[in-house]
């Protein structure tokens, strides 16, 4: 074939195949069958082999892979690729939203919310209507040229009907379906499995053989145009990109209020599994580009956009060892020491394994790679083992037989999941019990910190709770301790003395009885009035107490019957401990009524809580039909709207203060 003839056919075939390919991948239509398509592609391939100089830049053969790439070339981004700030809940989102509203002096503003695909970012340049280059984010300034691999993404047109140069950005990802197929194949071939679609996508883009990359089936959705745009808003620019048949993230919405932004975030947080790919959040962006310019950037992130990160996230990390800690009740808790790993903005190095039943259930072996997840409660949890990463000859983690602190034989009653050190003088138990006793919610002894406890134990000055009240007999010993002057000793001893009159509910809480928290301690104090009354509570009396179940009842009875505890209480009484009677004002107007607090308050939330609870209000966190009042501070959030819809009485702080002063009845 003559070169001229070949050039003509190559051009025609390239155009036709690209037309049918775009028709199929961008519009989901097909006017020819697969055989015809493959035939044309084979013809083009063989002509390109004969006339390699004639291969056009947008040749569809580049999608199926060609020569392996020797290395990825570093390329500097003409416009840096930044990252985003994160928010993790409605309060943080609201803060971000309001900071912007405050800065823009009542101008019209709208927000584009887009699902945040969990893949990796890519920047793509088109020049003269042709795909020119695709570069990974790298460090934001310099990335790798992965053009050949990106060309394998069928949904990305190699040529567009726009001659002006543009730079667009988006997220490369693997659908969950492709991810499962790839892992199934790898399992059959005895290859290590990918942990998640994001890792599989990121791994695939680094493969130097484009034929293998093509088989992986990467995909892409664009979310930005950073050069060559003409509109004044982000949303219009995205529509322009769609008109060039670029694959734009369609899971987006323009919102005009905080409420609808939050609704979009919540909708996708709960509906993320309905998408064919993984998302890890929602990105919220100011739509108007002039407002974006006004807001500008901090060092690394734009002020005009933020990522709402979904709560539960999973990462993996290698287990460095299991530490066994003994709590104040003697219960042994295995804690995993992990290779530091970032999870929702914090570095996780340790995570509780709760108990050895859990260790066995998860089947954890030494040096295993563990999956760590943070739920809504922010505490990292070990949720599984990546068995594919298990080391050869690794041994299972076994439960200890002896207390790691005092070496006493541990007790493991069959019905109980907890392993316990039952040695009452185990230093860990003593230390834990003393720390709990002096704590704020307990006896709240001022000038007495955890460091003091450790020091006094080490010096042999205290070994049990009553010893705290005997410290005054060791004044000389205290004076020689480092960091203790006359004044500080005086302050400490006065505070200890003062605590003798701490209300009974705090003393009961301070005893650290299993299953008895702050609230239950108040109920018990209300029932027993005086310390002696508490020590003589009966099963019959306890079973009549509202909110007390059999486990709590048993815990109290076990505690008050134990001779060691009886001895402790007797010693405390003989040392002058006379807790104040705790009276529940049973006639209080507020008894049993519930209050939810929202917004920014003039006093701390804790202070309000204490004041409200002192008169019998129950302070709860969520608004429901049963809520009696909502007390609002400044900038109240969604709780305010919910309360309005449920027709719940709303009070300002000053109205509430008036009620507490009894100037107002709660029902006025
Ligand atoms: S905008 C300066 N929009 O999330 C703004 N990012 O945490 C740059 N991502 O690096 C990003 N979907 O890889 C934006 N709709 C979306 C996104 C998105 C996914 C990724 C992107 C970025 C990372 C930031």
Image (spheres, grey):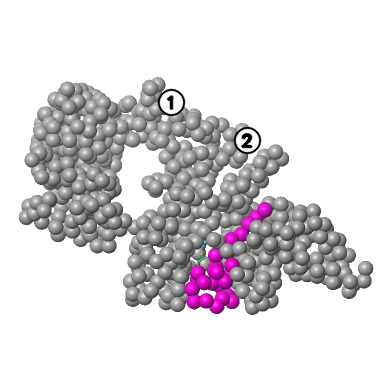
Which SS class for mark 2?
loop
Identify the residue under disc 2. 392
Q: Quadrant of residue 450?
A: top left
For marks 2 and 1, give the CA distance: 26 Å
Residue 536 visible in this rendered orientation of the protein: yes
Look at the picture and state if 604 lies above or below 108: above
Q: Are marks 2 and 1 in contact (CB under 8 Å)?
A: no
Residue 129 at what x, y percent from top left?
68, 74
Left or right placement of residue 503 versus residue 147 in this view:
left
| Image coordinates for residue 291, horizontal then vertical, percent | 42, 75
Would the CB of label 1 be found within 8 Å of ligand 1? Answer: no
Q: Quadrant of the N terminus?
A: bottom right
In the visual, does 468 lie left or right of 218? left
Front one among 81 and 364: 81
- Height in image: 53 above or below 509? below
Instruction: State the residue in front, 27 or 561.
Output: 27
**Image location of residue 50, percent across then percent down:** 88, 65
Check residue 488 for magenta coloring: no
The disc at residue 458 is none
Q: Residue at x 13, y 45 (%)?
A: 590
Mark 1: give few (<14), some (14-19) or many (20+) Cα within 10 Å. Answer: some
> In front: 109, or 511?
109
Q: Which residue corresponds to the image point at 52% horizontal and 32% vertical from the top-left?
A: 363
Give the label, 2 or 1, closer to the camera: 2
Residue shown at 44% from the left, 42% from the top: 381
Is 613 in front, or is 14? 14
Residue extending furthest toward the right: 1
Looking at marks 2 and 1 on the same chain, the residue that comes earlier in the sequence is marked by 2
Extreme-left residue of the structure:
663
Residue span colored magenta: 217-242
- Image coords of residue 154 (percent x, y): 68, 59
Residue under pointer 1 = 401
């Amino acid at each position: 074939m003559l070169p001229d003839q070949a050039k003509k056919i190559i051009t025609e075939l390239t155009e036709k195949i690209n037309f049918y390919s775009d028709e199929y991948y961008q519009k989901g239509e097909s006017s020819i069958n697969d055989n015809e398509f493959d035939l044309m592609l084979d013809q083009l391939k063989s002509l390109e082999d004969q006339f390699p100089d004639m291969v056009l830049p947008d040749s569809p053969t580049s999608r199926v892979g060609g020569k392996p790439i020797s290395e990825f070339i570093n390329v500097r981004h003409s416009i840096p690729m930044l990252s985003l700030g994160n928010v993790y809940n409605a309060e943080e989102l609201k803060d971000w939203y309001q900071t912007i509203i405050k800065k823009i002096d009542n101008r019209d503003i709208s927000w584009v919310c887009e699902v945040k695909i969990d893949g990796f970012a890519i920047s793509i340049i088109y020049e003269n209507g042709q795909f020119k280059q695709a570069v990974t984010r790298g460090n934001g300034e310099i990335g790798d040229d992965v053009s050949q691999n990106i060309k394998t993404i069928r949904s990305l047109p190699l040529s567009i009907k726009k001659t002006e140069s543009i730079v667009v950005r988006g997220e490369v990802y693997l659908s969950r379906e492709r991810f499962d197929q790839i892992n199934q194949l790898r399992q059959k071939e005895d290859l290590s499995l990918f942990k998640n679609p994001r890792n599989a996508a990121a791994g695939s883009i680094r493969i130097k053989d484009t034929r293998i990359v093509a088989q992986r089936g990467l995909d892409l959705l664009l979310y930005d145009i950073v050069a060559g745009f003409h509109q004044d808003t982000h949303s219009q620019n995205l529509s322009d990109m769609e008109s060039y048949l670029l694959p734009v993230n369609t899971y987006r919405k323009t919102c005009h209020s905080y409420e609808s932004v939050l609704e979009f975030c919540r909708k996708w947080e709960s509906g993320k599994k309905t998408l064919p790919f993984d998302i890890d959040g929602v990105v919220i962006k100011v739509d108007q580009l002039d407002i974006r310019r006004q807001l500008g950037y901090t060092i690394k992130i734009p002020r005009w956009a933020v990522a709402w990160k979904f709560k539960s996230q999973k990462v993996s990390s290698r287990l460095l060892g299991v530490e066994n800690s003994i709590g104040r009740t003697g219960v042994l808790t295995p804690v995993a020491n992990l290779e530091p790993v970032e999870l929702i903005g914090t570095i996780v190095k340790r995570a509780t394994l709760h108990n050895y039943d859990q260790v066995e259930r998860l089947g954890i072996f030494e040096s295993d790679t563990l999956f760590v997840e943070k739920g809504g409660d922010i505490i990292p949890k070990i949720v599984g083992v990546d068995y594919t990463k298990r080391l050869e000859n690794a041994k299972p983690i076994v439960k200890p037989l002896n207390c790691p602190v005092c070496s006493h034989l541990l007790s493991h009653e069959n019905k109980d999941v907890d392993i316990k050190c039952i040695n009452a003088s185990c230093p860990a138990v003593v230390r834990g019990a003393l720390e709990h006793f002096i704590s704020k919610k307990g006896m709240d002894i001022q000038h007495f910190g955890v460091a003091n406890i450790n020091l006094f134990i080490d010096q042999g000055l205290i070994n049990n709770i009553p010893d705290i009240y005997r410290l005054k007999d060791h004044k000389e010993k205290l004076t020689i301790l480092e960091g203790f002057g006359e004044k500080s000793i005086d302050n400490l001893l006065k505070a200890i003395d003062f605590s003798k009159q701490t209300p009974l509910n705090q003393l009961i809480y301070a005893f650290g009885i299993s299953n008895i928290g702050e609230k239950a301690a108040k109920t018990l104090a209300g029932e027993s009035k005086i310390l002696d009354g508490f020590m003589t509570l009966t099963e019959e009396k306890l079973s009549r107490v509202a909110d007390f179940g059999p486990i709590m009842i048993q815990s109290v009875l076990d505690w008050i019957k134990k001779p060691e505890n009886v001895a402790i209480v007797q010693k405390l009484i003989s040392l002058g401990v006379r807790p104040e009677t705790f009276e529940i004002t049973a006639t209080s107007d507020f008894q049993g009524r519930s209050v939810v607090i929202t917004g920014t308050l003039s006093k701390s939330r804790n202070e309000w809580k204490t004041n409200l609870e002192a008169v019998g209000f129950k302070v709860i966190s969520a608004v429901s039909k049963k809520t009696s009042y909502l007390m609002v501070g400044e900038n109240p959030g969604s709780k305010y709207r919910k309360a309005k819809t449920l027709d719940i009485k709303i009070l300002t702080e000053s109205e509430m203060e008036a009620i507490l002063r009894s100037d107002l009845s709660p029902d006025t």
